[in-house]
Amino acid sequence: MTYHQPVPLLWWTRRRSYVVFVLRELSSVAVAWFVVHFLLLVTAVHRGPGAYQEFLDWSARPLILVVNLVALAFVVLHAVTWFNLAPKALVVRVQGQQVPPRMIAAGHFGAWFVVSAIVAWVLVVML
Amino acid sequence: MPDTITLQVARYRPESESAPTLQEYEVPLREEWAVLDGLNYVKDHLDGTLSFRWSCRMGICGSCGMTVNGDPALTCGTFLTDYAPGPVRVEPLANFPVIRDLVVEIDDFLHKLPEVKPWLVRDDDGGVDDVEFLQTPEQLDAYKQYSMCINCMLCYSACPVYGIEPDFLGPAAIALAQRYNLAPATSAHQRLDVLATDAGVWACTYVGECTRACPKGVDPAGAIQRYKLTAAARTLLPWGKR
Amino acid sequence: MADHDVVVVGGGGAGLRAAIAIVQARPELSVAVVSKVYPMRSHTVSAEGGAAGVIAGDDSLDEHAYDTVSGSDWLCDQDAVEAFVEEAPRELLQLEHWGCPWSRQPDGEVAVRAFGGMKKMRTWFAADKTGFHLLHTLFQTSLRYPQIVRYDEWYVTTLLVDDGRVEGVVGIELATGRIEAITGRAVVLCTGGCGRVFPFTTNGNIKTGDGMALAYRAGAPLKDMEFVQYHPTGLPFTGILITEAARAEGGWLLNKDGYRYLQDYDLGAPSPTPVMRSMELGPRDRISQAFVHEQEKGNTVDTPYGPVVYLDLRHLGEKVIDAKLPFVRELCRQYERIDPVHELIPVRPVQHYMMGGVHTDIDGATGLAGLFAAGEVACVSINGATGSAPTRCPSAWCSAAGPGSRPPSTPWRTPMPRASRPRSPTSGGAWSTTCWRAATVASGSPTCAPTCSTRWRAASGSSATPIRCSPASRSWASCGSGSRRPPSRTPAGRSTPSWSRRWSSGSCWTSPRRWW
């Protein structure tokens, strides 16, 4: 008779990496929230200026602001862990030498920063 | 430094108990004693009924993996003085059924291992007659790390996914598949049907604890993420099927 | 009761190799591999340094045979050695074809290193985890064959002998206590040695001589049991082996005054770079003996775990140590808490290998019909009294048999580009032939393998300690010299082996010569 060790309900609190893992999994909820928020925005724009203003006022309420900030934190967490993972999945060789994992991660973060800067520039300057 | 240290050892005697209990033993605390030496002291001098596996005591046979103070570890390479003044809690590896005391059943892994075909399948192998396949040190380096797995099962014990989803192939099995995938003159795709599945690499959520637990620096988490990329390219990209 | 064609007892290097050879030669046969541990726990896993097989262009089978015979103190069976040196390269190459990660030269060819007792570079190695890679390569390759049925953590208690013929074994499944007979037309013992009768040994806990006892009780003779090899460099307390490769790469042995004392023991003159078969690369028994003499002179350093001398690797530098001896560094850091890049490694001789074992003929057949033996449990003998270091591992895989279909006794490495190299449509060759011989009547090959963790039998409550400690302490105290062996270096100590055997050089070696 073997004894099957149960997995405790709070197993994920035992290690920092487990907590981070569970938070990263939860970040999918934050992503879903942003999608819903965006759909609400599209609907409001579709319905006309009044509805759009109503949407803006609603979005400015402290509760919605907090929800959005928390969701942003989750999405940033997801992005950071994702880019940290990149050197694990990508092994690049240049002239026979393996590119150090840090370089690959740095490349990803650099690209992320550049794309974010371009998006910000488009939003702020162009519009 | 005190002369002794307390070991809290998980005991499970299936003939008389329905669940494990902790039993305390006082063992000498010596500079060069590993947790395994403490257990052997218990076995030899205090309680001959204690069951555990061990053999080489040099970190290569993979027998003596246990949970020490909550972390999976090879007990031959985990030193008592690092836990002074104690107590040191020694339990069987998590995520495995316990047969007795500190002995766990690893049959699940041994059934999964052949599924990933951990052997070399090369098209050009006609036989050994005087033929030596060339392999540059760089080609060797490409897979060598993944060949260092000693099957100690610490990664399975550290992996929460395996704990929750026992169908998961698991870190060591996938790392060993990668070891043969990356060997020269072999195709990385002959194991696709096993690895690119819900129970294969896609079950992994990249907790990364397997790599941290590995006593041999194998980096199974890296192996799995690499294969995710291979599998995605193979199944999603139009030219991947070639 | 379970029935198979062949029952292999032990799942280490020898056992797995035998099982694979049998099913390759005769795929219709069912082979049971009964081991008291999971095969990958077998003690083959601990071998570090390498395995000898002639491959370099300036080497020859004759020279390998000569080194092996002289390294055995002239006490081996020269026919067996001849067969062994011819099979060794093929076996090592076979492992390469199965994916064993041999260390390589920059051009991609298998690299060979110098080793104690060998005059040429012919020791194949996978960094300093050779045994580990060999065992796992064999284990993983064995998973290909559904005909190989494993009985993991089954402890064999008895050989079933009927009318003078071995017909199977009785085993206990350790997890449940179930007792069952496993029958077969032939039984191959591959259970490794019995180093655990010594208190200070490199051997794992599982090397308890089970196979030797099984064979002895069944009436098969043992031989050469007085020949016990001491390895010169074990870490004090743990007995963990610091591989000979550490010396082959240029490590020095120093006494308490920092003096390379081997020069005082007729082992050559010190030189900054390693010289084959000289100083630190002399035969293991000579180096271990030198330690005992140094101890008598008071030139060793006392520690709580006995007298030690020092192995100095510092001059090799971090780069060489990490590339060639990573495991040595790992072991020293973890178990001695020293870093060999900057510090001296304390070492002392340690029991390492049983040269003797179950007597077999050149085909691996024992004195008992239906019973074969291979690996450390067996004695063919190619080790004689002292055994050259890298001989033991390949001997695990090489058949001691098989006339015909051998590589020519000349250097045979073909430095052609891979694509243009000759290919043979068949695989297997001499080994498989032999193995089938041993498989109908079942065959094996020689070397290092183990069996069960005594700890596992735990429930009985008995302790192995008193048994382990008593004869063991005595043997260390009385053995004195490195390997236990006759005092003279002449072949007189044993019944005459096949001295009349003619080698291709036309001569046969009957007298000791100088080593260098």
Image (cartoon, coloured by chain):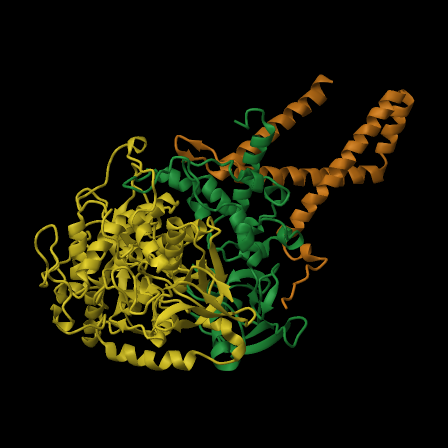
Chain colours: A orange, B green, C yellow
Left or right side of B172 for B147:
left
Point 54% across, 35% down: residue: B230
Q: Quadrant of the C terminus of chain C?
A: bottom left
The residue positioned 44% from the left and 66% from the top of the image is B55
* Residue C406 to residue B48: above or below: above
In the image shown, does A108 or B135 lie closer to the viewer? B135
Q: Using the rendered view, name the quadrant where residue A10 is placed.
A: bottom right
Residue C305 image position (x, y, % from top left) = 34, 74
Name the residue at 43% across, 63% down: C184
Residue at left 16%, top 54%?
A: C271
Name the foreground residue: B77 vs C90.
C90
Determine the image quadrant of residue C44.
bottom left
Write down the quadrant of residue C259 in the picture: bottom left
Residue C225: image x %, image y %? 26, 73
Q: Position of residue C321 (x, y in %)?
A: 32, 51
Q: Is residue B148 left or right of residue B232?
A: left
- Residue C480 location in percent, x, y? 22, 76
